[in-house]
Image (cartoon, helix red, strand yellow):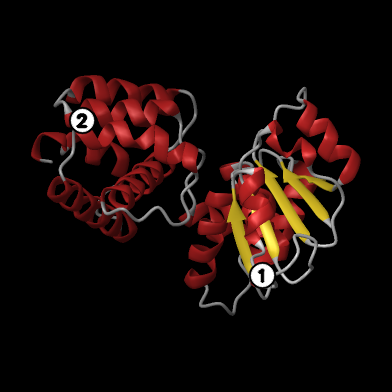
C-alpha cells in the first residue's frame, strides 16, 4: 500500500506521520529509490512487515508501483506539475492537508480542548489558522482553567494575544537599537488603528517567549515560519538580555493585573533604555 500525504498545513501533516509511526511495529525513513529497495533487509521489499517513509520528492521514485508494504510519501509543497506527483496520484491513497478556515478551524479547536463555541470563535479570530500556535495556546488555556472548567471567551481575551503583526518585530528591533522614539511611534500607530494596550502587551510577551525558546534551542510548538521571522532579532539580544527583558515583562504584567500599571505596552517601551 502506498500513501501520499501533502499540503501546507504542516501541523496536521506531521501529526498524521507521527500517528502512522506510533502504530507501526517497525519503520524506516529513506530518500532514494535504492534505499527504499534495501530498507526491508532480510525480507522482500513487498513484505508488509515494515512501514517505509519517503521524504525526498524525486522522480527517482517513478519506478515504484503498487506494493503490499506500507510506503508513505509526505511533502509540504510538492510541485503538482511534476510526473511524480501525477504518478503518485494514480497509484497512491492521497490525502491533502489544506489550511483550515472558518467553521472547520473552530471545529478543530473544539476537538482539541474543552472550550465553548464562543471561545473557539474568539481563539480562531485572534490566532488564525496557525495550528502550531493554536495547539500551544490551547495547552496554556487548559492549564489556566485547571483542566476542569470549560474555556470561555473571556479566558481567551485575557490570555491570548492576536496575530503577531510585522510591526511588532520592527518595534522589538527598534528597542534593541535604543530607538525608543521610533518604537513609541509604532505603538501609537497600533493604538490609533484600534488595538488596545493589553493586546499589544500580550504580543510583546508572546514574542519574547518565542525568542527565549529559540535562544535555548527549544523549538517545540513553534511553527517554522515564526522561527524564521524571529531569528534575526536574536542578533541584537544576548540570552541574559532576553531573560532580563522577559522578567520585566512579567513584572509589568503583574502590576497591570493589580491595576498599578494602566498602559502595559507603553510602559514596556518606556523602559527600553533600561533593557
Mark 1 in CB contact with mark 2 (< 8 angstroms): no
Vertical side of 238 occupied by 82: above or below = above
> Residue 93: horizontal and vertical position, in percent?
86, 50
* 1 or 2: mark nearer the eye: 1
**Mark 2 = which residue?**
175
The disc, 1 or 2, on the residue closer to the chain's N-terminal end is 1
Name the residue: 18% across, 33% down: 236
Q: Quadrant of residue 43?
A: bottom right
Can residue 116 be seen here? The reply is no
Extreme-left residue of the structure? 274
- Near mark 1 (Cα within 10 A), the count class, few <14, some 14-19 or many ≥20, is few
Name the residue: 66% across, 70% down: 42
Q: CA distance from mark 1 to mark 2?
A: 61 Å
The numbered dot on residue 42 is 1
Give 137 or 265, whichever is nearer the viewer: 137
Can residue 146 be seen here? The reply is yes
> Residue 40: horizontal and vertical position, in percent?
67, 64
> Residue 95: horizontal and vertical position, in percent?
81, 47
Give 134 or 35, whichever is nearer the viewer: 35
Q: Would residue 236 be found to the left or right of residue 4 on screen?
A: left
Q: Would residue 13 be found to the left or right of residue 192 on screen?
A: right
Give 261 or 55, whichever is nearer the viewer: 55
Instruction: Please identify the quadrant where the C terminus is shown.
Output: top left
Amino acid at each position: 500500500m502506498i500513501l501520499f500525504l501533502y499540503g501546507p498545513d504542516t501541523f496536521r501533516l506531521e501529526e498524521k506521520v507521527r500517528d502512522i509511526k506510533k502504530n507501526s511495529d517497525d519503520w524506516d525513513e529513506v530518500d532514494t529509490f535504492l534505499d527504499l529497495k534495501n530498507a526491508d533487509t532480510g525480507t522482500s521489499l513487498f513484505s508488509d512487515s515494515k512501514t517505509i517513509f519517503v521524504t525526498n520528492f524525486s522522480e527517482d521514485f517513478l519506478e515504484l508501483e503498487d506494493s503490499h508494504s506500507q510506503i508513505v510519501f509526505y511533502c509540504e509543497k510538492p510541485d503538482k506539475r511534476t510526473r511524480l506527483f501525477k504518478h503518485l496520484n494514480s497509484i497512491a491513497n492521497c490525502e491533502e492537508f489544506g489550511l483550515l478556515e472558518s467553521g472547520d478551524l473552530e471545529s478543530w479547536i473544539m476537538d482539541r480542548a474543552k472550550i465553548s463555541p464562543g471561545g473557539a470563535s474568539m481563539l480562531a479570530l485572534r490566532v488564525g489558522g496557525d495550528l502550531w500556535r493554536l495547539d500551544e495556546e490551547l495547552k496554556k488555556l487548559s492549564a489556566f482553567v485547571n483542566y476542569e472548567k470549560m474555556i470561555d471567551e473571556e479566558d481567551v481575551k485575557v490570555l491570548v494575544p492576536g496575530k503577531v503583526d510585522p510591526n511588532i518585530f520592527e518595534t522589538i528591533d527598534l528597542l534593541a537599537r535604543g530607538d525608543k522614539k521610533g518604537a513609541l511611534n509604532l505603538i501609537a500607530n497600533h493604538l490609533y488603528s484600534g488595538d488596545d494596550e493589553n493586546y499589544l502587551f500580550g504580543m510583546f510577551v508572546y514574542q519574547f517567549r518565542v525568542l527565549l525558546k529559540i535562544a535555548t534551542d527549544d523549538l517545540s510548538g513553534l511553527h517554522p515560519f515564526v522561527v524564521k521571522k524571529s531569528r534575526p532579532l536574536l542578533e541584537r539580544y544576548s540570552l541574559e538580555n532576553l531573560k532580563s527583558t522577559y522578567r520585566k515583562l512579567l513584572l509589568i504584567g503583574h502590576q497591570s493585573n493589580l491595576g498599578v500599571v494602566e498602559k502595559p505596552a507603553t510602559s514596556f517601551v518606556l523602559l527600553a533604555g533600561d533593557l
